[in-house]
Image: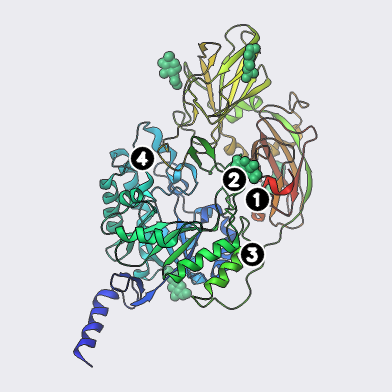
Amino acid sequence: MGARLLYLLLLGLLYEQPRGDRSFTIDDDQNCFKKDGVCFHYISGSIHYFRIPAIYWKDRLMKMYMTGLNAIQIYVPWNFHEPEPGMFNFEGDGALEHFLDLANETGLLVIVRPGPYICSEWDMGGLPAWLLNKKDIVLRSSDPDYLSAVNSWLSVLLPRLRPRLYNNGGNIISVQVENEYGSYHACDYSYMRHLFHTFRLYLGDDVVLFTTDGNTDRELKCGSLQGMHATVDFGPADDAKKAFDLLRRYQPTGPLVNSEYYTGWLDYWGGNHSTASPQMVSHGLQTILEMGANVNMYMFEGGTNFGYWNGADYKEQYKPITTSYDYDAPLTEAGDPTEKLFALRSVISQFLPVPEGPMPPPTPKYDYGVVKLQKVGDITDFLDILCPGGPIVTRYPITFEDAKQYFGFMLYRTRVPWEIPDMTSLSDPFNGVRDRAYITIDGSFTGVLERDHVRMINVTGSAGDWLDILVENMGRINFGSFVNDLKGLVSNLTLGVDILTDWLVYPLNIDGLIAENWPHMHRNHIIMAAQPESHTGPAVYTGTFKTAVTGDTFLKLFKWTKGQVWINGFNIGRYWPDRGPQVTLYVPGNILSNREMNNITVLELESAPEILLIFLIDRPIISKNDHGF
Ligand SMILES: *[C@@H]1O[C@H](CO)[C@@H](O)[C@H](O)[C@H]1NC(C)=O
Ligand SMILES: *[C@@H]1O[C@H](CO)[C@@H](O)[C@H](O)[C@H]1NC(C)=O
Ligand SMILES: *[C@@H]1O[C@H](CO)[C@@H](O)[C@H](O)[C@H]1NC(C)=O
Ligand SMILES: *[C@@H]1O[C@H](CO)[C@@H](O)[C@H](O)[C@H]1NC(C)=O
Ligand SMILES: *[C@@H]1O[C@H](CO)[C@@H](O)[C@H](O)[C@H]1NC(C)=O
């Protein structure tokens, strides 16, 4: 054995294989990742476990594996796992470690992006809304209150990941720090350095840490940091060579990585459904792979923004994201393979061996037919049970955060202060309705104020009438400078020229009540609506249906306007067919029962149809335009 070979062997043992035969490192001479000492490229796909019921995780991972991927990329949403300070949830759909086990079992490596900020079109970019208890907190910066919450979260999360790092026998090959930090205005290097040291402290010196940024100078400059591998993101319409050339100015050596290669795009309420053709997306992938780069496809399966979890963008105006996060990804929202998946698979097969055997089939979808609902009552009929602690009495409006009600709905109630027989303006002069306000005077629905869109309505009324304003949080901004997105009435409303005062503010615990099977346990008393024939204004409707099988279905609220739906206590999300583009809601089969009655509760905020029907159909309609609506 020559001395040089011996030397190389020793070098290999000492540096490249720190734990037995397992190592994952960066080679700056060969410009590649090295897995167990051998050049390695990943072809990965993003999947958000928090947007998919846990029962389906294995099925989706298997489909990704069968496409030929050798890795997956995940975000970890802080707000999902720490809903209240110091209260952690790693169970059920939040069972991160179980998900990592399933990926390992399936033969997939994992790239983890634990934030703490993740964007992801998720409420507040994954940051917990309780951070806003300090109103002027500077998020994503060295603000000491922000850092202390971050430190506490990372001290819980990162030790859970450590034993699962590749070097330690697990399947996590690399970890991203922050997320597209260069797009944020703060450009605070000490914050990024603080995160870098914290990640090193908990994860050790061996793990590959990296950053991801948009492909502009400003973004790469503020987002990358010495000691972490810089990567970019870009889509099929961008020039891959140009993007990687720019990356090379900030990351001269090591593997080229596109951490978010866009397979589609997100949808906004009131916008069109986004699509990207299979030809274009697969061609772009081919270009990247021919350049010898590593790639993660964002998204491979998008899934669903159940409950209140959708985020929002702010581009000249507030733009909330739809409930469906289908993303036009290779696997649909419901986890079914598409033409795009097969096009990508055939590109991948030129570069990696694609596993033999059939792709798992789409899960069956069911048409359960029509369900007739009944009106239970107006939201104001239930204030005593929705807000058992009673209202907060306040001269001027307070925010959701002030009331420690971070999601959903609050009711702001005052009395009409004087006779208004003639049309008088009820206005939002400071644009402080966050985000939509449903207005009822003396029990009659009068109209809607909407952030950035509708700043005044005309009303009439009598002195002393109840003026009820139900305010909906439609999702916190997840990107850009306005992430401190307080909810509720964040400024005063005026009637005529006078400020309205003396409010009763009711934080509504509707999810808590529905979790106790309200109002179904009161079935005998269900026809208690004071105004059963009125279908306008915020009101609760319920119905039941029986099924022999429990499979996925899609809920179509034809001629309903806007609201929220729960099935068997599970909050399946917001509907707004009136605005689109999404028309149906995905209902995962696992929440249904084939033994008991299935219970549906609908909170319709504006106007329900005359005949209270909803439809459970066997296909999604997420593009209003495509279906002649
Ligand atoms: C990952 O899977 C491999 C085999 O596929 C197994 O040997 C190993 O124990 C698994 N690791 C973990 C952390 O589950
Ligand atoms: C949606 O697409 C239609 C038809 O292409 C177009 O006229 C309309 O402006 C688009 N709407 C938005 C919000 O982009
Ligand atoms: C409100 O009423 C005033 C006076 O009648 C009228 O000029 C105005 O157009 C109305 N505005 C709306 C939004 O209906
Ligand atoms: C409402 O107006 C009063 C009087 O101008 C002011 O003190 C208060 O801060 C305002 N409240 C909000 C929420 O803007
Ligand atoms: C629906 O509500 C009824 C009445 O309270 C209850 O008996 C049943 O268990 C509920 N169904 C499910 C699937 O939870």
Disc 4 secondary structure class: loop
- Tell me, yes or no, if residue 116 can be seen here: yes
Of residues 79 and 570, the one nearer the viewer is: 79
* Mark closest to the chain's N terminus, 4 or 1: 4
Of residues 88 and 154, the one nearer the viewer is: 154
Could you tell me which residue is drawn at 63 percent across and 56 percent down? 334
Could you tell me which residue is drawn at 69 percent across and 35 percent down? 561
Cα separation, mark 4 vs mark 3, equals 41 Å
User: Which residue does the numbered mark 3 point to in the structure image?
Assistant: 339
Counting from the top left corner in percent of width and height, residue 95 is at 49, 56
Closest to the camera, between mark 1 and mark 3, is 3
Categorize mark 2 by other alpha carbons within 10 Å: few (<14), some (14-19), many (20+): many
Examine the rendered structure and indicate whether residue 509 appears above or below residue 262: above
* Mark closest to the chain's N terminus, 3 or 2: 2
User: Which residue does the numbered mark 4 point to in the structure image?
Assistant: 139
Residue type beneath disc 3: Glu
Cα separation, mark 1 vs mark 2, equals 9 Å
Cα separation, mark 2 vs mark 4, equals 26 Å
User: Which residue does the numbered mark 2 point to in the structure image?
Assistant: 323
